[in-house]
Image (tube, rainbow, N blue to C red):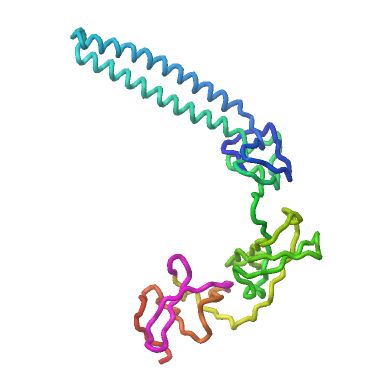
Amino acid sequence: LAFRVGGKIIERSAEIGQPVEPGDVLMQLDAGDLALNEEALRAQLAAAQADRNQARAKYDRAKALLGRNLISRNDFDTLKGAYETAQARVQQAESQLSGGARQTGYTQLQSDQAGVITAVQAEVGQVVTAGQPVLSMALPGEKEVEISVPENRYDELRVGDEVQISLWSAPGQTYQGRVREIAPLADPLTRTYAAKVTFVDADPAVRLGMTASVRASRRLALPAIHLPLTALIEQDGQPAVWVVDPKNLKVLRRRVELGPFHEDQATIARGLAPGERVVTAGVHKLYPEQSVRLLDD
């Protein structure tokens, strides 16, 4: 969570572990300067309204005089234009005051939904900028476990797989989980792949911030298929390759699921079978059903 304006924090009512509801005030910035600006804008609006009222009175008198032919059309148009200009200035001042009031309101950090405070990143007396994180909040709903998958276990896990979750705080209890997400790229420092596992049957004993372990059934490893990066194309935002039909030597575009990347090669996790022929050069010049010739023929 972050403020939409910068300033000095003068009050913090949120504590780690505290449940919050929509509308709860979590932090407060010093609104002195913004309040002064709002008052100045309010004074500008009052002045614009006074000018508008005076211009409207002159315009109303001019309309009455015009009906009696006691004022020229040119003078009437001048007074009418002055009134319309004054009215436009009032509208501009109202808009500026509305914006100033919103800026003042932004000095209060309010929760827009229910949740639990998980971290405090700023304290009273600290000057923060707009957009700087000051609090972290966990939202209600499904609970997840974040795990790191080593390279040699990557092919054993798929999105949607059922897994077993154990909490260190309750070693005898296991929960059902489902793999929701697996990162396609390894972390450059740890060389592991981040994955998220969703609890299927979480109970109140599962609390935020707990440590857990995840156990997955070993999948029979199939021979890994590696292709040069030059073989990859895109189809509707998804990776694909050109596969050669051995019967007529025509190419077909097929979506694939990528595994780990190794230097200039990509691992094909799903979508290709061992022994299938794939185009690896000139892939962006091909079209479906185009005939090709194998280099080894």
Is 242 one of the magenta-colored residues?
yes
Q: In this view, does 108 lie to the left or right of 123?
A: left
Vertical side of 267 occupied by 132: above or below = above
Q: Where is residue 1 in the image (x, y as percent from the top left)?
A: 62, 44
The residue drawn where x is 57% and y is 31% is 105
Vertical side of 88 occupied by 148: above or below = below
Q: Is residue 142 left or right of residue 168?
A: left
Q: Can residue 6 be seen in this view?
A: yes
Q: Quadrant of residue 52?
A: top left
The residue drawn where x is 65% and y is 61% is 198
The residue drawn where x is 28% and y is 18% is 80
Q: Work out whether residue 205 or residue 235 is closer to the camera in this orientation and state it.
A: 205
Q: Work out whether residue 24 or residue 86 is closer to the camera in this orientation and state it.
A: 24
Vertical side of 254 occupied by 178: above or below = above
Q: In this view, does 149 lie to the left or right of 91?
A: right
Q: Where is residue 26 in the image (x, y as percent from the top left)?
A: 66, 37
Q: Position of residue 129 (x, y in %)?
A: 60, 39
Q: How many labels does the image show?
A: 0
Q: Is residue 132 visible?
A: no
Q: In which quarter of the image is residue 167?
A: bottom right
Report the magenta stretch's main SS: strand
Find the magenta span and give its range.
234-261
Is 178 one of the magenta-colored residues?
no
Q: Where is residue 208 in the image (x, y as percent from the top left)?
A: 72, 53
Q: If the image is split into quadrants, where does the C terminus sit? A: bottom left
